Amino acid sequence: MKEIRAYVRRDEVNELVERLRAAGAPGVAIIEIHPLGYGYEANPFERFKAGVVDRYRHLAIVKLEIVCTDPQLERLIQVIEDQCQSGFGGDGMIFVSEVVEAVRICDRARGEPALIESRPQDQRGATHAVV
């Protein structure tokens, strides 16, 4: 299993998440961040007056986290690249890490089966979505 961490522009997120889900991504976590480095430049007009966070506030970047199976990896990276690549700085970054284990808490599914959606029923018979 792999974890993809992709840092992309916020204006790409809605369509990107839809494309990732259509490509088989088991789930996507979206986290708003304030980037420093990796090509993200501060506002040049406030370089000396503003603090470091204020200078970077205008950068609308989010981090996507996706845990996927090994066979899904290249397809999901391709989706991110196709959606976000403009050819100019600030398109984003993708990092891939190994995932040693995944555990879905509600039914204790482990490994790749934990990544597959299921709808277990609770004791009252209600169905819950699990991602």
Image (cartoon, helix red, strand yellow):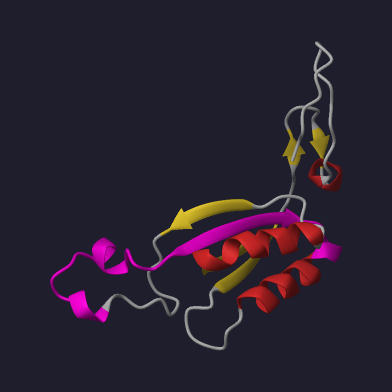
Residue drawn where x is 67% and y is 71% of the image:
80
Extreme-bottom residue of the structure: 87
Is 25 left or right of 91, judged from the image as shown? right
- Relative to the observer, which residue lies in front, 93 or 9? 9
Residue drawn where x is 72% and y is 50% of the image:
27
- Residue 37 visible? The answer is yes
Magenta extent: 44-72
Image quadrant of residue 75?
bottom right
Q: Quadrant of the N terminus?
A: bottom right
Residue 124, position in %: x, y? 80, 11
Is 58 left or right of 112, judged from the image as shown? left
- Residue 2 visible? The answer is no
Relative to 5, say whether 86 is above or below. Answer: below
Is residue 52 inside the magenta stretch?
yes
Residue drawn where x is 76% and y is 57% of the image:
21
- Relative to the observer, which residue lies in front, 16 or 66? 16
Q: Quadrant of the C terminus?
A: top right
